[in-house]
């Protein structure tokens, strides 16, 4: 027990010494690579936007207006960050989809690079199941939208974060976004309630919700193979070189992208010792049934 | 959101403070608790307790080093939980090894049941830490405050594992001498 006494005594170390011990050289190679990747994506999005000429619609302003009306639940800087992560706006060739996070949520759609627009309302998004009950006062703080197949689209909405959990709602459209149907998700089912970091559907049946690491190092990805009826965690072993210390490296997966049966899922690996982040990629060649580190 | 902004939310009694703290430092505190408790469920509860304790502490406190402030609370709560729930068991994995190493400088130091950590003892450990150079102090705290493995510490400081062990051994000897000079371990 004496050793335990010394251990407890060390717990009284001055906070400035503890902070000092966090300082040693942190390598930034991974962070830089990540920043470059994000910048490249953002630049590509902006270039495409400028070429398509739809920036005149001021999409960012439209989304920000909604947040401002809701007492600034998402700041301008946070929205910029979310846009760079692929939230709220989806671009695919000449097709553009924009989420307006109102209640109910509205979707702006264009299939001619922004020349003309149509609007749809997401039935069922006027309320959200959160914290044990159906709530009509929930504000949407995150959102992903995308497409699959010929005429399929998916929509994921995230509510407020609380103690490492976040209520979410998922919707599917089979008519290019004209009408939407809510499907079950891991939060509703009580299967998993973490903080959503990405969503994608390869088909109407096969979908993925990605989560920030929390209870374990991750990567935490839940998958449905039956259109949301059931969800289960994807078994993903860490890369071989990181298998030795399961708590040193933590994983944050992001929205996968699919082209037919081929798909890729970006995963940021954070080294908790050095603070270095490295971007990895999980790849599938069978429509998301199996994944391997690329 | 910066630490200063989060602390301001606590002062305004805005519960968003807890959400932001959890976002920013949830995994950090969980890792620390997990290294001590070696039990995910307990560690998860320990982190939640940390947020509750922080909510009660700020105000009146306004920590200068918020991350370290949270780490201290998490560590203290984890240790309390370990004592309560596992009685004599010393936890698993890395903590058991760290305690074994510390055993060499404990001597006749009082057991935790006999001696609460008083402000006088806080001064004692900080006096000792202040006598070390920055690298020694950092390596010592990474091992015995944060319960990191020697391999992790070696990576952090760009040293070989053997060098870390040597520095730790030397620092433990200094601690033993220091405690003896202060009337402990006689």
Image: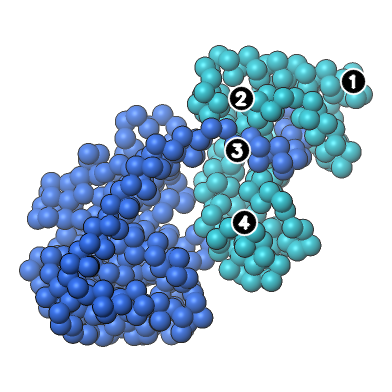
Neighbour tally class for label 4: few under 14, some 14-19, many 20 plus, Cα within 10 Å: some
Work out how far the residue at label 1 is from the one at label 4, CA to CA, in angstroms.
Answer: 39 Å
**Residue beneath label 3, please?**
A22
Kindly indicate which chain is depicted in blue in the rendered structure.
A
Kindly indicate which chain is depicted in cyan in the rendered structure.
B
Work out how far the residue at label 3 is from the one at label 1, CA to CA, in angstroms.
Answer: 30 Å
Which label sits in the foreground, 4 or 2?
Answer: 4
**Residue beneath label 4, please?**
B3
- Label 1: which secondary element: helix
Q: Residue furthest right?
A: B183
Q: Earlier in the sequence, mark 1 or mark 4?
A: 4
Q: Is residue B117 above or below residue A140?
A: above
Checking the image for residue A259, the label placed there is none
What is the quadrant of the N terminus of chain A in the image? top right
The answer to whether mark 2 and mark 1 are in CB contact below 8 A is no
Which label sits in the foreground, 3 or 1?
Answer: 3
**Residue beneath label 2, please?**
B97
**Can residue B120 be spotted in the picture?**
yes
């Amino acid at each position: 027990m004496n050793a335990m006494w010394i251990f407890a005594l060390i717990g009284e170390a001055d906070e400035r010494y503890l902070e000092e011990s966090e300082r040693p050289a942190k390598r930034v190679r991974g962070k830089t690579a990540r920043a470059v990747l994000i910048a490249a994506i953002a630049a590509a999005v902006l270039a495409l936007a400028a070429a398509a000429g739809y920036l005149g619609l001021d999409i960012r302003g439209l989304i920000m207006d909604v947040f401002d009306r809701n007492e600034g639940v998402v700041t301008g800087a946070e929205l910029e960050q979310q846009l760079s992560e692929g939230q709220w706006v989806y671009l695919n060739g000449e097709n553009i989809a924009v989420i307006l996070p109102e209640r109910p949520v509205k979707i702006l759609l264009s299939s001619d690079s922004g020349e003309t627009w149509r609007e749809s309302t997401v039935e069922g998004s006027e309320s959200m199941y959160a914290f044990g009950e159906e709530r009509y006062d929930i504000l949407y703080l995150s959102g992903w939208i995308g497409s699959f197949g010929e005429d399929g689209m998916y929509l994921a909405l995230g509510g407020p974060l609380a103690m490492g959990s976040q209520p979410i709602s998922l919707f599917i459209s089979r008519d290019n976004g004209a009408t939407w149907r809510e499907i079950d998700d891991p939060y509703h089912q009580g299967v998993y309630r973490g903080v959503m970091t990405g969503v994608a559907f390869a088909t109407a049946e096969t979908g993925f919700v990605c989560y920030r690491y929390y209870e374990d190092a991750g990567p935490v990805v839940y998958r449905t193979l039956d259109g949301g009826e059931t969800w289960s965690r994807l078994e993903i072993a860490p890369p071989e070189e990181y298998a030795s210390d399961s708590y040193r490296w933590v994983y944050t997966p992001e929205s996968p992208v699919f082209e037919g049966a081929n798909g890729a899922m970006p995963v940021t690996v954070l080294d908790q010792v050095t603070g270095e982040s490295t971007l990895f990629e999980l790849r599938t060649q069978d429509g998301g049934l199996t994944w391997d580190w690329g | 959101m910066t630490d200063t902004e989060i602390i301001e939310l606590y002062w305004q009694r805005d519960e968003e403070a807890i959400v932001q703290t959890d976002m920013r430092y949830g995994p950090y505190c969980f890792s620390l608790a997990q290294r001590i408790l070696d039990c995910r469920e307990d560690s998860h509860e320990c982190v939640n307790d940390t947020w509750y304790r922080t909510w009660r502490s700020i105000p009146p406190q306004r920590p200068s080093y918020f991350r370290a402030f949270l780490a201290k609370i998490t560590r203290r709560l984890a240790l309390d939980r370990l004592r309560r729930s596992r009685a004599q068991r010393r936890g698993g994995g890395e903590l058991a090894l760290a305690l074994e190493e510390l055993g060499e400088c404990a001597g006749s130091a009082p057991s935790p049941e006999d001696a609460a950590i008083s402000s006088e003892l806080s001064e004692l450990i900080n006096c000792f830490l202040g006598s070390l150079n920055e690298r020694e102090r950092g390596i010592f705290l990474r091992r015995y405050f944060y319960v990191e493995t020697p391999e992790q510490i070696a990576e952090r400081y760009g040293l070989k594992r053997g060098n870390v062990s040597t520095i730790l051994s030397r620092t433990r000897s200094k601690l033993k001498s220091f405690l003896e000079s202060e009337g402990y371990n006689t």
